[in-house]
Each structure stands twice: as C-alpha cells, then as structure tokens.
Image (spheres, helix red, strand yellow):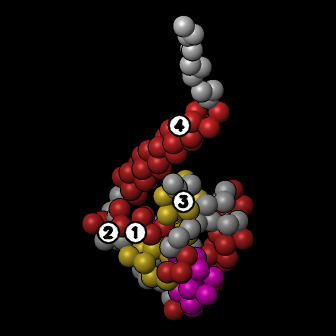
Amino acid sequence: MAVTCQELLQIFAAQKMKLCAGGSGLGHAVRWFHAIESVEDTEFLQPDEIVFFTGVSIGDDDAAFRALLHGILMHHGAGIVVNLGKYIHGISEAACAFAEAEALPLFVLPWSVRLGGVTQALGTRILSERAKEKNIRGLIKKCLFSSPRSEEHTSE
C-alpha cells in the first residue's frame, strides 16, 4: 500500500509538521518527492509526488505561491510541504483557501527542520512500502498460478 499524505503528517508530527489546508486530500498517495524552487519547475513534477518547497525563488510573493499550487494541481502532485521561516514567513488565507477548495494538502515545517532528513526518511518509507507490495504481489501470483502438486496414486 502506498504512503499517503495522512501518513506523511503522522510520520513527521514530531518535527512539527502541520497541515494548513487541503485536509480532504490526505488520502492522496505519495509515490515519491520532488524539491521545487520555482513555479516553472512544476512542469517536471510527476503524478503523486509530494513537493518540498523553501521559497528561495519567490519569498513571500503570494501570487507566485498560488501559481505554484496551481502548477502542482495541474500535474497531479500529491501535495506540498513548505519549509517556513527563512524565505516564506507564512501562508496567506487566499493560498489556504485555494488548497482547501482543491483538496491539495498544504503542509508547513519550521525552518529549523532539515529537509534532507525528512526526504531521506520519506524515501526510505516509500521504498519499504514498495518492497512489501512487491512481495505480496509475488506471493499472490505464486498462489494463483502455481500448479498443484500431483499426487502419486499407487494401486494395489
């Protein structure tokens, strides 16, 4: 089973990750993660990737941030994690309203949390879940398609 945005929130609650908006999208699958630092970079986003964003390119430019959210939505991203503090100091009500209306989970993490550790832990979790899925599929395939043992019958 794929990691979901809900699990992401649970995994990183100790790092003070908080959901700002888009709670109805917490069931979105997170297949991988992508660090994006400009609105134009959303074209490289794959479906079901969670975006990690520091805001270095836009700072507190709310219109640019909302354009970023729109780009994530258009490329079927799972959601966004914003590293608040150095470049982005807060999320506007308009951005939250957009994320909420579109069921796009919008998370924040304090600047003191190192994104490298977060992405490493998330990547490890995703790969572990993929391995479990592969093992389960293999077991099911083996059960469904293996031939039954032929029993030897001896006659007396």
Q: Which residue is mark 2?
A: 13
Q: Is residue 14 left or right of residue 6?
A: left
Cα separation, mark 1 vs mark 2, equals 6 Å
Q: Secondary structure at mark 4?
A: helix
Cα separation, mark 4 vs mark 3, equals 24 Å
Q: Which mark is in front, 4 or 3? A: 4
Q: Secondary structure at mark 2?
A: helix
Mark nearer the N terminus (4 vs 2) = 2
> Picture quarter containing residue 14?
bottom left
Q: Which residue is mark 3?
A: 30
Which residue is pictured at 67% across the width and 56% down the height? 46
Q: Residues within 10 Å of mark 1 (few under 14, many from 20)?
A: some
Residue 30 appearing in the image:
yes
When the figure is inspected, residue 12 is found, relative to residue 147, above or below; the finding is below
Mark nearer the N terminus (1 vs 4) = 1
**Image quadrant where one finds the C terminus:** top right
Q: Which residue is mark 1?
A: 9
> Picture quarter containing residue 77?
bottom right
Three-letter amino acid code of the residue under disc 2: Ala
Which residue is pictured at 42% across the width and 64% down the height? 7
Three-letter amino acid code of the residue under disc 1: Leu
Query: Could you say which is closer to the camera, residue 3 or residue 115?
Result: 3
Which residue is pictured at 55% across the width and 76% down the height? 25
